[in-house]
């Protein structure tokens, strides 16, 4: 028989489960009441046959003797005053035959028979008969040991070795909280959820448990590791799939949060998933990165994203939740029994769970590292909470070998690195310093770091978690690396980009000072790898234009006349290789505003670009292609020059009217956002040109369709906002005194560890 660890439930969780369970068992709807003075009523039904009361007692660690004594002392006087027609007791305490007889006698005639007394065994048996009810209550589902293990062992549903490693350990220590419930309800209603919050608050944990929940509903779980485009390659129309995109804006604010046009592709994927049953998308990001991305990408500031955001807040981790998190991590850690028992002391656990910097990740890392180092774990816990940087500083600066530290410094310059690239860059770095750089030393350094500070998956190396990466950035900013040698060791331009992005951060002045000091080396590297970069530009986000735009921004940051001159030379070369016109627009603006570029040069480049756009637009106008010609028309308007647009207007109007005629003759489509954008663009152009009366009937048809699609979209969006935006109910807030008592009782269980 399966079992449920009902101790995972809160008192309120247990009451909610009992409401649904006994409503089904008794065949009557039961009311549930807010917390407070309940007059002996947890659940109630009043009808023609009289009043039925269900009393819920969630005391999973109490004895039967204690339960019976408290019921007779505290509840019996209330029951006599209420005089219900039927009184039922539901408890997480085990009840024997003798115990039931004693309660039946004490509560007669309100308890009709011992069949109205449900101990933990009877409740579990009833739950096992109702798997759908268990599935509806995540905390109950999570407490089902066999169900959870069955889900986590379904390899066909886990498409990532990282997830296969992480999910079981996360499930062991996870504690559901209000932030999780908000995210779960948002995902249920919209199929898309963006989980935001500060570092270490538990965003990835929530995302993983949402994935586990969906696995229990037959979904395959796919990890998205690089780009939203991966979803398209993994998409199978006849399969339930959830896509988990952890840190989709990056783990730190290094560089632009998203590549060019990725914001548009991301929104398209979100909309597609929202409209497709059997698909789901869970993304995580740090809250400040999301705000930064919204400033840089207008599309991310719209309701498509904002309505899908669920923020995990520190106050979601109330005293009870923090206590349960600490207990779970201590109980399941590899600490010696004596060290675990120390956390049963109120003077030890209370300062931890009440600390302003309480952070699940920091608790986990402190326990893990203290075990390895044999230090006083209780003292280390408070010291690390007071100064979270201590977790890694002592290790990096005092315990790691030089070759391991050098590997961390090199790894920082990659987002994640293939083993070959990492070894090549590390080898160059060590060689520049005159240090041993053979393969054996490299493998030894990697072995020291693997599983503690870095992870290795499918031949790629990455930081074990973002807090380590943050510390290495601090380490570099504090001038603890050999910058001259490190810069000469870089093998890809992305490594330079990472360092430049670190220098742009508010706390990156140290990195910036070192890059300015070695400006000539940086300039040489950027120019040297330029030809290699040109051969690797294959994504629609990348082009010669975007690279030159970045180089010019770097020139301004470092005050580098050398890099500015390089950009000017490159923008004198033939026009075609620069890339899409949308990318050229950014480069034009950068040249226009740069203090390092003469205005005459910027103006000449602008004119060459606009002349080329104008010529291409005329070709599409002549070919009768409305959509390409209007796209280029808008592009031309954003890059004004002496080039005249008048000669194209007549052809554009002709193409627009032909498209109007074609659309009006087609059957009306189902409302779809992309379709709306096409309609709005066509209608807007015709109105601005004042030619709607040339085809009044056709215009009325298309205009009406545009209005209906817009109205349908707004109605759907408003329904989401009004019905599903989760508001915290003050009545659901935990009672601090009661939570303190619950945590005290829980932590005392550590005293029993031997």
Image (cartoon, grey):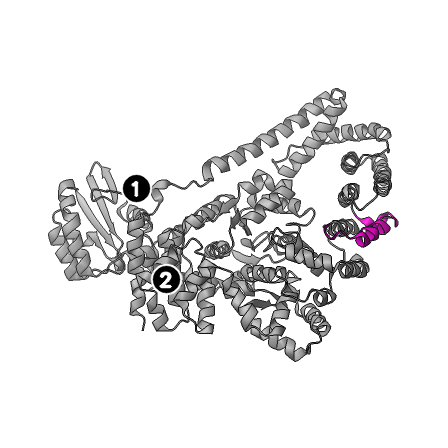
Residue wearing tag 1: 34
Q: Nearer the viewer, residue 527 or 305?
A: 527
* Labels 2, 1: front one: 2
Label 2 neighbourhood size at 10 Å, few (<14), some (14-19), many (20+)? many
Location of the C terminus (image quadrant): bottom left
Q: Nearer the viewer, residue 24 or 258?
A: 258
Which stretch did the figure color magenta? 557-579
Task: Report x, y in % for residue 187.
Answer: 49, 47
Task: Report x, y in % for residue 562.
Answer: 81, 54
* Residue 567 belongs to the span the image colors magenta: yes
Residue at the farthest top position: 693
Element assignment for label 1? loop
588 relative to 166 in the view: left or right: right
- Most frequent secondary structure within the magenta stretch: helix
Cβ atoms at labels 2 and 1 below 8 Å apart: no
Q: Nearer the viewer, residue 477 or 648?
A: 477
Picture layout, residue 248 above or below residue 612: below
Q: How many marks?
A: 2
Label 2 or label 1, whichever comes before in sequence order? 1
* Label 2 to label 1: alpha-carbon separation: 28 Å
At x 76%, y 45%, the residue is: 583
Residue 716 appears in view = yes
At x 13%, y 50%, the residue is: 107
Residue wearing tag 2: 327
């Amino acid at each position: 028989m399966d079992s449920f660890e009902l101790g995972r439930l809160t008192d309120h969780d247990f009451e909610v489960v009992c409401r649904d369970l006994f409503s089904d068992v008794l065949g009557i709807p039961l009311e549930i009441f807010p917390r407070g003075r309940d007059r002996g009523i947890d659940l109630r039904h009043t009808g023609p046959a009289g009043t039925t009361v269900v009393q819920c007692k969630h005391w999973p660690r109490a004895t039967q003797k204690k339960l019976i004594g408290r019921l007779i002392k505290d509840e019996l006087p209330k029951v006599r005053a209420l005089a219900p027609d039927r009184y039922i007791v539901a408890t997480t305490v085990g009840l024997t035959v003798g115990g039931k007889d004693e309660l039946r006698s004490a509560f007669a005639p309100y308890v009709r028979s011992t069949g109205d007394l449900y101990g933990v065994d009877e409740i579990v048996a009833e739950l096992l008969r109702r798997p759908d009810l268990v599935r509806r209550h995540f905390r109950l589902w999570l407490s089902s040991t066999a169900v959870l293990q069955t889900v986590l062992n379904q390899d066909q549903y886990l498409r990532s070795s990282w997830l296969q490693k992480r999910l079981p350990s996360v499930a062991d220590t996870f504690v559901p909280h209000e932030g999780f419930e908000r995210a779960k309800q948002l995902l249920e209603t919209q199929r898309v959820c963006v989980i935001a919050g500060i570092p270490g608050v538990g965003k990835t944990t929530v995302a993983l448990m949402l994935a586990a929940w969906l696995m229990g509903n037959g979904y395959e779980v796919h990890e998205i590791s690089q780009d939203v485009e991966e979803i398209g390659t993994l998409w199978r129309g006849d399969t339930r799939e959830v896509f988990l995109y952890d840190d989709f804006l990056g783990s730190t604010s290094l560089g632009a949060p998203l590549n060019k046009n990725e914001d548009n592709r991301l929104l398209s994927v979100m909309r597609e998933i929202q409209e497709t049953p059997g698909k789901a998308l869970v993304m995580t990001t740090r809250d400040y990165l999301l705000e930064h991305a919204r400033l840089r990408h207008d599309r991310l500031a719209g309701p498509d994203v904002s309505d899908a955001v669920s923020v995990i807040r520190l106050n979601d981790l109330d005293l009870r939740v923090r206590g349960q998190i600490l207990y779970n991590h201590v109980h399941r850690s590899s600490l010696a029994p004596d060290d675990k028992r120390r956390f049963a002391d109120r003077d030890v656990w209370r300062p931890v769970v009440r600390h302003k910097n309480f952070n699940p990740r920091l608790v986990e890392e402190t326990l893990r590292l203290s075990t390895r180092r044999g230090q006083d774990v209780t003292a280390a816990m408070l010291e690390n909470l007071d100064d979270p940087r201590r977790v890694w500083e002592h290790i990096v600066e005092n315990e790691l070998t030089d070759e391991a530290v050098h590997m961390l410094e090199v790894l920082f310059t990659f987002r994640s690195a293939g083993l070959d690239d990492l070894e090549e860059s590390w080898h160059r770095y060590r060689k520049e310093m005159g240090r041993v750089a053979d393969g054996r030393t490299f493998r030894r350094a990697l072995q020291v770091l693997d599983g503690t500070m870095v992870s290795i998956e499918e031949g790629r190396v990455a930081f074990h978690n973002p807090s380590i990466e943050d510390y290495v950035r601090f380490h570099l900013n504090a001038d603890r690396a050999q910058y001259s040698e490190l810069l000469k060791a870089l093998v890809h331009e992305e490594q330079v980009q990472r360092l430049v992005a670190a220098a742009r951060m508010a706390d990156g002045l140290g990195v910036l000072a070192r890059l300015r000091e070695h400006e000539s080396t940086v300039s040489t590297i950027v120019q040297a790898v330029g030809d290699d970069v040109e051969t690797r530009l294959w994504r629609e986000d990348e082009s010669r234009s975007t690279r030159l735009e970045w180089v010019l921004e770097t020139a301004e940051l470092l005050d580098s006349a050398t890099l500015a001159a390089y950009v000017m030379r490159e923008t004198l070369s033939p026009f075609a290789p620069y890339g899409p016109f949308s990318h050229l627009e950014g480069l034009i603006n950068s040249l226009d505003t740069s203090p390092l570029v003469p205005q005459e040069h910027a103006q000449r480049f602008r004119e060459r670009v606009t002349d080329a756009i104008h010529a291409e637009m005329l070709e599409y106008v002549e070919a009768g292609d409305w959509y390409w010609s209007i796209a280029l028309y808008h592009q031309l308007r954003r890059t004004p020059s002496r080039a005249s647009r008048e000669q194209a207007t007549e052809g554009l109007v002709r193409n627009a009217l032909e498209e109007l005629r074609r659309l009006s003759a087609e059957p009306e489509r189902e409302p779809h956002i992309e379709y709306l954008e096409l309609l709005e663009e066509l209608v807007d152009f015709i109105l601005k040109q004042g030619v709607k009366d040339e085809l009044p009937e056709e215009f009325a048809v298309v205009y009406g369709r545009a209005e209906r699609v817009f109205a349908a979209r707004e109605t759907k969006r408003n329904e989401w906002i009004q019905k599903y935006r989760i508001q915290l109910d003050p009545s659901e807030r935990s009672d601090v005194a009661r939570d303190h008592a619950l945590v005290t009782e829980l932590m005392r269980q550590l005293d029993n560890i031997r």
